[in-house]
Amino acid sequence: MPGVTIEIPRELAAAQAEYNGESGRAFIAALPDLAARFLSRWDLEPEAGRNPMHGVSALVLPVVRRGDGTPAVLKLQLLDEESAGEPVALRVWDGDGAVRLLDHDAPTGTLLLERLDETRMLSHEPDTRRAVLTIAELLARLTSFPAPPGLRRLGDIARAMLDATPRALDRVPDPRARRLVADCAAAVREVVDEPGDRLLHWDLHDENVLASGRAPWLAIDPKPLAGDPGFELWPALDNRFDPAEILWRFDAMTDVLALDRARARAWTLGRLLQNALWDIEDGRPLDPAQLEIADRLRTHGV
């Protein structure tokens, strides 16, 4: 679109270069032309006085539709196996507990989404218990839907994690941490043959929940997969980490979602295993807070 200048945040460019290398740099270089293309195609214009927003992987432009002035956001992102599932999940939810999808371009992964209030994140809620219950209530709605065909499947992810565990454990020098990661793998091994079939968000932490005019809170930015809702609880345990609250949060969420507590514990330990494998692969130390969460859950309710 002639005359439109899109400023690319330096933090987004740096994150793309760090995590995606050459493909990330190419994505950043193409962003101005990509934005202009979809502003024109969907008859949008950037909203005056509103700065672009971004996370690690996407640029989000506040826009208005030229025809009727409807506010929206244009989400430009690098297409990968996680982002490819986002419009699939949003179409299934159709605004029930999540941001509404207005339009989508499959080849590029570009999304046009309803505008929520980005100044009011759930992370701003001072009552952390209220925040945890809000996430649980959203998850109860989101995971009530069966997963559609074609999404990543928790069973495949879990089996790959179990295959990678023995080699990874050899690279954990601390005996206690190594034992804890091994215990998490053992817990996953007990449930891997029943991975579930619900539509999961996977990344519902308290900065991925925004206020809206049509609902108090709505989820954004899913990384969807098909699986057991117990695999959804980890972010809310880790948000604003408080050791004294770990078991209360777990019990409250399993109550709201009506989950079998033993299965939910096993799949929650699976999230520690997933995070630990990523850290080990990247040469990072295991996160003490995450190890504490897993340690407290290991025998909870047994």
Image (tube, rainbow, N blue to C red):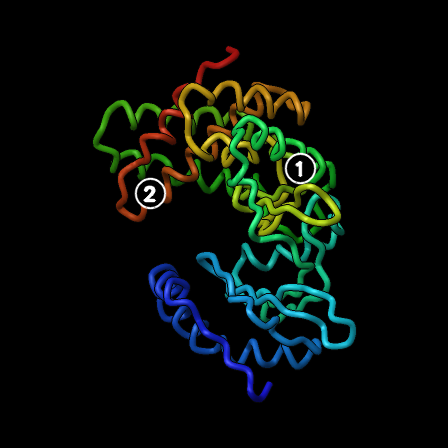
Residue 83 percent location from the top left of the image: 56, 58
> Going from the N terminus, do you reach mark 1 or mark 2 first?
1
Q: In this rendered view, identify the residue nearer to me: 92 or 193.
A: 92
Q: Is residue 116 left or right of residue 93?
A: left
Q: CA distance from mark 1 to mark 2?
A: 29 Å
User: Which disc is residue 5 wearing?
Assistant: none
**Crowd rating for badge 1 (residues with CA inside 10 Å; few <14, some 14–19, many 20+):** many
Circle 2: residue type: Asp
Residue visible at 52% across and 19% down? 248
Residue visible at 63% across and 33% down? 134
When asked about the image quadrant of residue 112, the answer is bottom right
User: Which disc is residue 279 wearing?
Assistant: 2
When asked about the image quadrant of residue 227, the answer is top right
Determine whether 247 is above or below 9 in the image: above
Q: Secondary structure at mark 1?
A: helix
Residue 28 percent location from the top left of the image: 43, 72
Residue visible at 56% across and 76% down? 35
- Front disc: 1 or 2: 1
Q: Is residue 240 left or right of residue 115?
A: left
Q: In this rendered view, identify the residue nearer to me: 22 or 43.
A: 43
